[in-house]
Amino acid sequence: MSVAEAARPAAVRPAPAPARAVSTRLLRSELRLIFGRRRNWVGMAVLATVPLIIAIAAKASPSATDGPDFFSGITQNGLFVALAALTIEIPLFLPLAVAAIAADSVAGEAQLGTLRYQLVVPVGRTRMLAVKFAAIAIFAAAATAWVAFVGVVAGLILFGGGEMTLLSGAQVSMAEGALRLLGVCAYLAVCLVALGAVGLFVSTLTEQPIGATIAVLLVHVASLILGTIPQLDWLQPYLLNVHWLAFGSLMMDPVATEPLQDGLLSAGAYTLIFVTAAWARFAGRDVTS
């Protein structure tokens, strides 16, 4: 090595670029859009009226609550108000709320003409669709938790707490009853996410969010009807909402896990199929508005 080469400074390697943090800006923006609209506030208020009506009616006529399932235990423990409200709302009100949000996710942006401008931002379509689906899932969980929360507050105020008698007749502590209620909310949220996946796919097919909402509700109602026809018992295990009421298994002692596993497997399959279909449609969609 020559003297000149020895005196030459060694090449300085550039420092490795710091790892980019995962940005939640798009998700936060989508959630602000969902929870910031007044019509969605009205929808959440409507969801809250059901547990309030149940609690007030049970307090006014306690003898009328001598029925089956969760309604018979309302006067003994306020947690049953939340369970009764979820039982009433899961066939229609909660699916309607999730269907409206899911159907508006893409179709609403296309109708307003903002979808094209969103795609100008250097964000891939896959990431955008994932963000919209994540927002739908968060809303489904929030709506379910909101109904349960209002029911718990109203029930505890009017009827108090204490030991909880399960559907199987066993008694558990207040803390365990609350944990079982959280499990019910989690299970129903997963089921509603599957419906949201259907809504996300339908939303990529049209620019009319109202039409998409109606289509998702028709799928839901058709599944309910098909589930009541004895001649179609071979089809019923594969229907979208046939396992939703299996959350009652969490209020048994011991917990019947097989219906819950079937419900989670069904919800997971529907979610995977329709999110994939939405991605296939949205990734190649020609956005003109």
Image (cartoon, helix red, strand yellow):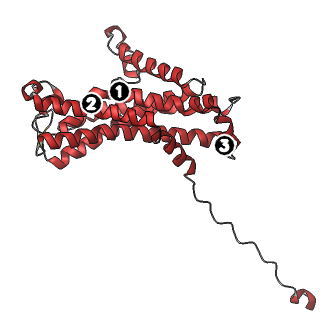
Q: Earlier in the sequence, mark 3 or mark 1?
A: 1
Left or right: 13 as drawn, with respect to 203: right
The image position of residue 9, as x and y in percent, is 84, 84
Residue mark closest to the camera, 1 vs 2: 2
The quadrant in which residue 40 appears is top left
Rendered residue at 24%/42% (across/down): 180
Numbered mark located on residue 258 in the image: none
Vertical comparison of 260 with 123: above or below? above
Q: State left or right for residue 223 relative to residue 105.
A: left
Assess whether mark 2 and mark 1 are in contact (beta carbons under 8 angstroms). yes
Residue 2, compared with residue 143, is above or below; it is: below
Quarter-wise, where is residue 75 in the image?
Answer: top left
Q: Badge 1 is on which residue? A: 93
Judging depth in this view, the residue of 72 and 108 nearest the camera is 108
At a point 58% along the width and 28% down the height, the residue shown is: 107
Amino acid identity at mark 3: Gly
Return the residue found at the far bottom: 3
